[in-house]
Amino acid sequence: MDVSRTYDVLILGGGNAALCAAITAAQAGRSVLVLECAPKHFRGGNSRHTRNLRCMHDAPADVLSDSYPEDEYWQDLLKVTGGQTNERLARMTIRHTATCREWMIRHGVRFQPPLGGTLQLARTNAFFLGGGKALLNAYYRTAEALGVEVAYDTEVTELNIRDGKFTSAIVARDSVQHEIQATAVVAAAGGFESNLAWLREAWGPAADNFLIRGTPYNMGRVLRVLLDGGAKSVGDAAQGHCVAIDARAPKFDGGICTRVDCVSLGIVVNRDAQRFDDEGDDFWPKRYAVWGRLVAAQPDQIAYSIIDAKSMGKFIPPMFPPIKANSVRELAQALELDPAALESTVAQFNQAVRPGTFDHTLLDDCATAGLSPPKSHWARPLDTAPFFAYPLRPGITFTYLGVAVNERAQVIWQDDRAAANIFAAGEIMAGNVLGKGYIAGIGMAIGTAFGRIAGKEAARNAAP
Amino acid sequence: MPLPRSIPVALVEEGQRMASICNACRYCEGFCAVFPALERRLSFAESDLAYLANLCHDCGSCYYACQYSPPHEFQLNFPKMLADIRVQTYRKYAWPSPLATLFQRNGMTVSLIASASLVLLLWAMFFFIERSVLFAAHADDAGAFYAVLSHRTMAWTFGIVSLFVVVALAVGLVRFWRETEEKFGAMLSPGPLTDSVADALRLRYLAGGGDGCTYPDETPSHARRWFHHLTFYGFMLCFAATCVATIYHYGFGWKAPYAFSSLPVLLGTAGGIGLLIGPAGLLWLKAIRDPALSGAKQTGMDVGFLALLLLSSVSGLLLLALRQSSAMGVLLGIHLGIIVALFVTLPYGKFVHALYRLAALVRFHLERRRAGPEISAE
């Protein structure tokens, strides 16, 4: 980091989108500085925790089976977002995924066949060998070989913008302020999911009980600076990818292994030992993001997934051991729930279960009758000791509030003009494409597409 | 009460904690055989960890890819934990059991044994052989070696040592296999055996995701794989040279030393060069390896074995080069002393990894052919 020079392209952030932009700009011959607020070990924001890329493809290709054409991808996106998406930008992203794997491989990323337990994603998602951190390591190696400078532990506190044009960034490192000059800037610094105060502002006091699945470094400072500076916002601050995860997970950075995948195999009760939603509504991969919100709406934002011995070993073993008891009453005591209430909930559920043929691989005919809320599939009485429970809390993965961009990744001001030399990529602008809901691997698709576009456009902008 | 030779409980518990995290995460599944093997299990007994530890090639790829490696609060250093367990399993399976203590401070032990072997042999030579014979310049005639040390002495010494070594290694292997709860015959199942031998000969799992393993640091490289190939194939060529020479001796009555252009010398020279470059390269990589992944116990053991391999090739090639000079007698003594030390320590040092790794691979390929646990989509 050299405060005496003017960099061609300054990249704010150090995740997937940031590195895609940095590599692209450096390959265009520009001098590039990447500012990463995390220490080196925790570099990469939430990209560290990712594992795949949703890819459009018209025929089977290396790790992808069958085909996943543009329109099907678009329909999937349209469905989960309920229309809160910009079709132009969304289709650009989708088309980009048809070809970007070759670029990724050239820059050190390796793909592997779908992971154990994820066969349903074999058609649509290409998994990174070793996950997102391995991808980041490869990109950092590539970027450094191209002469990209990386400053870790360096936080952006202000952007100097004059007449809609970026001139410099004020950054803090070791509590010392520096001013970094650059011709163009790419904001790729993620959302605000680690900023507990901001989450509380958006979600109310319930946010205090949220766990943050990803990096503790996404404080949303660059997002805030841009919004305060007059950038047009997209998405709702109270929208985010929110998953039901193990309540024993750490406050930050628990990542994938805090997941609990047995909701659809049993029942879920709240603090009052009452069920509150249909556990068997659909396959778990389509539901885990819904359950985060459901738990968030419960008192104290806590719930308990309860199964019996029949279901043990039939789902990916979670990191934390289950709470185990020989009767429903004992289980309630161990969970500090009202034993009578839990016994009554389980008894009512068991009575309502209609006979059927259990098959967890399809939407089977095991359902409850006359129960509210119902359990539509995979309903089997909880009658075989021992009983097991996993406590659940909402786990925030990422937020959707972002800055509006155009197809050149330029930030849009509130008056709809495009910023000449300010570009955005990744989670900070993901809300343009994904305003609501979630489909696996879309975040990396947006980050890769817009990271490369932002890098190219910033390089062009900074052309001598 | 655990058996005295069991893996320490704290280490097993730490292994279980880490394996549970890996089993929930699964991002590393494509790197090697360890993760698919791990995912077939819902819980991890000591024997499971012992198997996984011996399946691990210590390439480091999973460590550098891990979202949970230190300083993350989960403190997940999976390959280091497996390396610690692996050393413990070597002790556990060693035969005769009291000699398992040789795995404690193994580097020191190996060098002491090597020194003792050398001193003993050289002392015996000085004591029993006339100076004029020992320091005579040799005409490189057939039988010149045996003028210094009789063929009978050499054959008996190595015969007894080899027999002991083979028995000790075999018992270790049986002990390893018994813990897997697989049938003994299964070890020789043609399919799994062929697959695992192929994996071993190609060092498939030192290829990382194709770019090589992250050794000695996070940059993928094939250096370790090639140095290991040189070491292994060098060792095998030297072994082949010895076999051919044995056939020459007993089958045809041709006596060593053989001509420079003869098959045993050509094989031995090629092997010697492999054993010169390979172990030297591995030692060099080890010296510059990321300290986060190298354990003191493991390093001592590795260095001990590599150093002996290197010394045997250096002394062997020197003997070849100077076999007509007056230094031949002493060099022969040194070379044989090192070879004896190398053989004696085979069952009590790094060499055992070859056996257990191959057996673990056989088990992996046996398991791979069976249905896995029925787990619903996540």
Image (cartoon, rainbow, N blue to C red):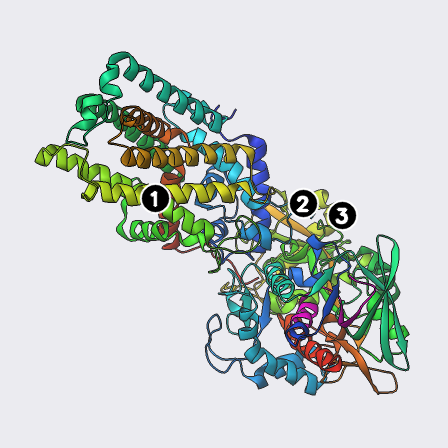
Frontmost of labels 1 and 2 is 1
Chain identifier of the residue bearing label 3 in the image: A
Residue at the image point whose x is 74% and y is 51% from the top: A341
Tell which of A449 and B325 is nearer to you: B325
Frontmost of labels 3 and 1 is 1
Work out whether A75 lies above or below A335: below
Q: Report the magenta residues as a range.
A: A1-23
Task: Report the amino acid beneath label 3.
Answer: Asp
Q: Position of residue A334 (x, y in %)?
A: 70, 42
What residue is disc 1 on? B273
Tell which of A443 and A185 is nearer to you: A185
In three-dimensional space, the C-alpha distance between marks 1 and 2, rounded to whole angstroms, equals 67 Å
Q: Which residue lies furthest to the left in this view?
A: B252
Q: Position of residue A434 (x, y in %)?
A: 71, 77
For residue A174: magenta? no
Chain identifier of the residue bearing label 1 in the image: B
Task: Report the amino acid beneath label 2.
Answer: Leu
Side of A86 relative to A381 (left or right): right
For label 1, the crowd category at 10 Å Cα-Cα, with few meaning under 14, some 14 to 19 and many 20 or more, is: many
Residue contact at pointers 1 and 2, CB within 8 angstroms: no
Task: Report the amino acid beneath label 1.
Answer: Ile
Residue contact at pointers 3 and 1, CB within 8 angstroms: no
Query: Which secondary structure, mark 2?
Result: helix
What residue is disc 2 on? A331
For label 2, the crowd category at 10 Å Cα-Cα, with few meaning under 14, some 14 to 19 and many 20 or more, is: many
Work out whether B337 lies above or below B73: above
Q: In this orientation, does residue A373 appear? A: no
Q: Position of residue A418 (x, y in %)?
A: 81, 85
What residue is disc 3 on? A338
